[in-house]
Amino acid sequence: MKDIFKNFKFKVKAENKILIYMYNGNIIQNIELTFNEISNPEDKKRNKMNILFVEDEIPEHPHQGYIIKSNNIICPKFKENIKFNIEDYVMNLFECKISMIKIIYF
């Protein structure tokens, strides 16, 4: 699949863009997988699959536009480490450098 994605990117002249590929409602996270590892049984039988793609410009800042997995809770407003607690269906985010935020879940 990696070679297919590489050829596709060249064919649509998107070398300077980030392409996000989706199959079966999910983003293809690992382009190293093979057709048989990604496809569902129906597509394996017909030996064909439909993949959607979205293109985006390469951001100037290396982390802009990416989701980065963190081991800490991150303040949604200021992007800093933050602590939280939950009481009576209310999530309180606190000890952010700048402010305190309340999120209410029903």
Image: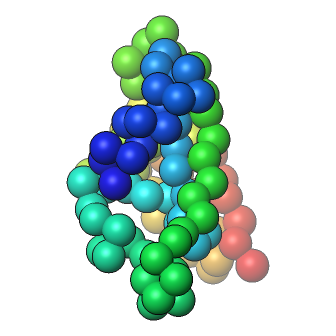
- State the image quarter where residue 12 is shown: top right
Point out residue 18 in the picture as x, y percentages from the top left corner: 49, 29
The furthest residue to the top: 60
In the rendered view, would you say 80 is above or below 59? Answer: below
Name the residue located 44 percent from the left edge and 13 percent from the top edge: 61
Quick check: can you spot residue 59? yes
Which quarter of the image is occupied by the C terminus? bottom right
77 or 42, which is in the foreground?
42
Q: How many marks?
A: 0
Where is residue 17? Give x, y as percent: 52, 23
For this rendering, which residue is in front, 35 or 69?
A: 35
**Nearer to me, 65 or 7:** 7
> In the image, is 69 to the left or to the right of 99?
left
For the point 31% across and 47% down, the residue is 2
**Residue drawn at (31%, 44%) of the image:** 3
Q: Position of residue 33 (x, y in %)?
A: 27, 62
